[in-house]
Image (cartoon, rainbow, N blue to C red):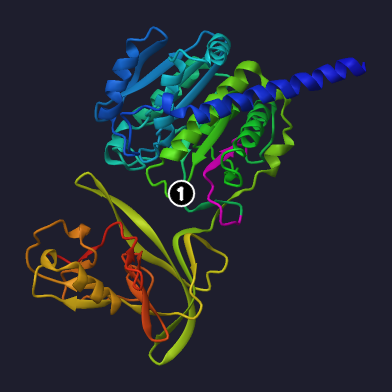
């Protein structure tokens, strides 16, 4: 009896060690599989079509058009493997949530490779059949927006089933009757793993099957698998893994698929410091999804303690892009202690990603955290000054600009034509002669900080400039008012 127990424990440890070893080799060898043509998170349908056509030439894959979007873009289904266990992965149901889409194309490269990981590859392809739907919402992806061309959230159309995209996803699900499903999304970068300063880079959920959140055998399998993936990822993003809200949503696909018999895992990719294009988190997605497939292939997930799932901290919305603490603010002869937070709103212009930093909260923000988090006790905050320029900003010299910054100027008022890209200028361009910077919610984050009555730091559009050392962290300035 003792011998048999030892053998079981040894086998469990060996199986989990194999999954961990596999993940480590993927992490270290990721560049061998990374799809090099994808370098930005703003993935359009036209970007993936050549990749789809390239993989069509490989007999490993079966590729078909599962449906067509309202604007006529193909929704593809890709399969690989011959095993009886079926896995269905779908991504970019929301057009601006592309991280897993990038990872799927990395996975296709891995599955078709021929290298030292062939033993793992063979185990996967012989034991499971994997189905990928890499872009459920190509019309939304075209504009990098959440909803489809009817402005409908596809993930709230699982029951009504009125949009072409939802019907396609439902039809494939009913046809496959997959054993496991992976519902792949991106969540807010301001989500933390628990009430901490650590971003929820990855959040998991085994979706509920009813309002009572009962756990049947189908949902339990999802919890087991998540427990193993959570333990494995601690090696790479420790403390940055959360659990998504488990409230039952009868209009959502994950909840419905779970209820209908497919063990479904929700993966939500959040934020990571200095990774605006999600390239590191794309790598993490590649590792976790590939490891999940191996775990299903060798059934190691069944041996993982499911209580680990309950230990995963819930998501908390407590992060900001910029958080400045404990400053003094004087207004109308009244002095207050104030914290300021700002978020950076992305927009695309001429192929570039630009940011508009907006003050979103003020007061006591001691329960919040920032990707950039500074304690400025002893500093006083002031609205940025605006310099009226008769010369085009494009001809102003760096020394003059540095002198303006050292005086607390964050903006230049100029009405004439510009000779260079306005957003590349190191100060904001103000077109409205009546515009004034304010320390108030909704205002552009342009202000300066003094200590002992001397300007020390200047924030232009939410990006910091160190006056003494002349160090600028500016990514882009803002253009305010009409031209």
Look at mark 1 in the image and give the residue it sits on: 188
Query: In the rendered image, is residue 410 in sight?
Result: no
* Quarter of the image where one finds residue 385: bottom left
Give how far across and how far down residue 55 sits, in percent. 34, 15
Q: Is residue 483 above or below residue 52?
A: below
Q: Is residue 384 above or below residue 461?
A: below
Stretch of the chain drawn in magenta: 195-210
Horizontal arrangement in the rendering, residue 221 relative to residue 188 (left or right): right
Identify which residue is drawn at 52% across, 15% down: 116
- Occupied quadrant, residue 291: top right
Local secondary structure at mark 1: loop
Res 333 → quadrant: bottom left
Residue farthest right in this picture? 1
Could you tell me residue 456's position as x and y percent? 38, 76
Q: In the depicted view, which residue is nearer to us: 252 or 362?
A: 362
Q: Is residue 392 left or right of residue 477?
A: left
Residue at screen point 35% across, 75% down:
448
Left or right: 330 in relation to 245: left
Q: Is residue 408 above or below residue 42?
A: below
Q: Is residue 429 left or right of residue 418?
A: right
Q: Position of residue 274 (x, y in %)?
A: 42, 49
Note whether residue 475 is visible: yes
Q: Is residue 209 magenta?
A: yes
Farthest-out residue, bottom: 333
Is most of the magenta stretch helix, strand or loop?
loop
Screen quadrant of the C terminus: bottom left
Q: Position of residue 230 (x, y in %)?
A: 62, 36
Is the residue 189 above or below the residue 474 in the image? above
Residue at the spot 48% in from the left edge and 30% down from the top edge: 286
Q: Nearer the viewer, residue 108 or 448?
A: 448
Q: Quadrant of the N terminus?
A: top right
Q: Residues within 10 Å of mark 1 (few under 14, many from 20)?
A: some
């Amino acid at each position: 009896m003792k011998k048999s127990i030892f053998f079981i424990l040894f086998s469990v440890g060996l199986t989990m060690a194999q999954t961990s070893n596999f993940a480590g080799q993927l992490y270290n060898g990721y560049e061998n599989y990374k799809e090099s043509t994808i370098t930005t998170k703003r993935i359009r349908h036209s970007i993936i079509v050549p990749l789809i056509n390239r993989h069509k030439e490989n007999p490993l894959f079966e590729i078909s058009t599962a449906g067509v979007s309202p604007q006529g873009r193909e929704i593809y289904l890709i399969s690989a493997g011959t095993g009886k266990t079926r896995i269905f992965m779908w991504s970019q149901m929301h057009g601006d949530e592309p991280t897993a889409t990038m990872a799927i194309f990395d996975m296709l490269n891995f599955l078709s490779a021929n290298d030292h990981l062939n033993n793992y590859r063979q185990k996967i392809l012989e034991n499971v059949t994997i189905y990928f739907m890499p872009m459920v919402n190509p019309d939304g992806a075209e504009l990098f927006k959440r909803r489809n061309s009817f402005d409908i959230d596809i993930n709230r159309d699982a029951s009504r089933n009125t949009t072409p995209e939802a019907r396609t996803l439902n039809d494939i699900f009913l046809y496959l009757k997959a054993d496991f499903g992976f519902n792949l999304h991106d969540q807010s970068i301001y989500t933390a793993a628990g009430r901490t300063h650590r971003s929820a880079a990855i959040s998991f959920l085994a979706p509920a099957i009813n309002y009572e959140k009962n756990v049947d055998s189908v949902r339990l399998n999802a919890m087991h698998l998540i427990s193993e993936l959570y333990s494995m990822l601690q090696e790479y993003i420790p403390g940055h893994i959360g659990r998504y809200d488990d409230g039952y949503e009868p209009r959502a696909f994950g909840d419905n698929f779970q209820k209908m018999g497919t063990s479904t895992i929700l993966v939500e990719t959040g934020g990571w410091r200095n990774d605006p294009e999600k390239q590191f988190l794309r790598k993490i997605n590649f590792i976790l999804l590939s490891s999940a497939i191996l775990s299903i292939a060798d059934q190691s997930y069944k041996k993982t303690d499911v209580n680990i799932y309950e230990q995963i901290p819930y998501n908390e919305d407590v992060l900001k892009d910029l958080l400045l603490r404990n400053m003094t603010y004087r207004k109308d002869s009244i002095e207050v202690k104030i914290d300021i937070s700002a978020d950076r709103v992305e927009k695309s212009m001429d192929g570039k990603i630009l940011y508009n930093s907006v003050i979103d909260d003020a007061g006591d923000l001691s329960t919040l955290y920032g990707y950039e988090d500074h304690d400025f006790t002893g500093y006083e905050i002031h609205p940025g000054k605006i310099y009226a320029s008769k010369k085009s900003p494009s001809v102003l010299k760096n020394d003059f600009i540095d002198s303006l910054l050292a005086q607390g100027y964050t903006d230049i008022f100029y009405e004439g034509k510009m000779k260079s890209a306005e957003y590349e200028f190191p100060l904001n361009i103000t077109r409205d002669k009546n515009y004034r910077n304010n320390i108030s919610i909704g205002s552009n984050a342009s202000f300066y900080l003094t200590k002992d009555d001397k300007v020390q730091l200047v924030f232009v559009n939410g990006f910091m400039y160190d006056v003494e050392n002349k160090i600028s962290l500016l990514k882009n300035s803002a253009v305010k008012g009409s031209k």
